[in-house]
Amino acid sequence: MVKMSFENHIMKQFDDELEEIRTRLMEMGGKVEQQLQHAIRAISEADSKLAEQVIIEDRRVDAMEVDIDEACILIIARRQPAASDLRLVMMVTKAVNDLERIGDEARKIANHAIILSEENEPSVGYPEVRHIANSVTKILANALDAFARFDADAAIRTIEEDKQVDLDYKTALREVVTYMMEDPRSISRAINILWVVRSLERIGDHAKNLCEQIVFVVKGKDIRRR
């Protein structure tokens, strides 16, 4: 882990502003992480009320994105940050966008949970959902932890973990399509499951983006096209 320091400015207020956006990003990350967990529970437990709560909470996530973006713009305008300070501010502006997208995908999962909860037929594809959901939840938690500690090495390890999610996603697609071919009555339910696993795969991608931005902040290297 590389220890980052943003506390060498003449004006302590600048230090406080940088720490504030960092703290607010972590708060948003915690909210999104909870939103994802609740969306997954809503699917597995056919809990439409919990799914509705996820949808409502997404509005709060959207508001947090706007507030943090505005704070970053003010820092750039007032302080004209450079070097690692500028990288941190730019990272936060990109990270809030990825977190907001994760919240959107959690909301989509919640919408499908409501639809699935209204059907009385046996579940199709839930094992695939649980498997990918467990992996994606872990990746998001690791990404947020890497940011909290400015741990570029942990971020890189998490990026590698997302490759397995991509493979599991392709496997889940094949299995769910097989369900549809074997039992046409399952098509409606299976299509909803396909959208759920698609949202989970996208959440993994956004978590990977967070890790790439952590490496950029800590090491000043852009690894997006490596």
Image: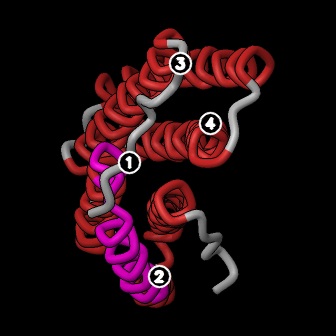
- Contact? badges 3 and 1 (CB < 8 Å): no
**Separation (CA) of disc 3 from disc 2:** 46 Å
**Separation (CA) of disc 3 from disc 4:** 18 Å
- The disc at residue 89 is 4
- The residue located at (46%, 46%) in the rendering is 109
The secondary element bearing badge 1 is classed as loop
Badge 3 or badge 4: first in the primary sequence:
3
- Contact? badges 3 and 4 (CB < 8 Å): no
- Under mark 3, the amino acid is Ile
Instruction: Give the dominant element type of the magenta stretch: helix, strand or loop.
Output: helix
Badge 1 or badge 4: first in the primary sequence:
1
- Nearer to us of marks 3 and 1 is 3
- Under mark 2, the amino acid is Asp
- Under mark 1, the amino acid is Met
Pick the residue in front: 167 or 142: 142
Residue named by callout 1: 4
Give percent across and percent down for residue 28.
43, 28
Q: Residue furthest left?
A: 45
- Nearer to us of marks 1 and 4 is 1
- The residue located at (66%, 41%) in the rendering is 86
Give percent across and percent down for residue 96.
57, 36
Pick the residue in front: 86 or 44: 86
**Separation (CA) of disc 3 from disc 1:** 17 Å
Badge 1 or badge 2: first in the primary sequence:
1
**Separation (CA) of disc 1 from disc 2:** 32 Å
Q: Is residue 125 visible?
A: no
- Under mark 4, the amino acid is Val
- Nearer to us of marks 3 and 4 is 3
Residue named by callout 2: 166
Q: Dot 2: few (<14), some (14–19), or many (≥20) neighbours within 10 Å?
A: some
Q: Which residues are magenta?
A: 146-170
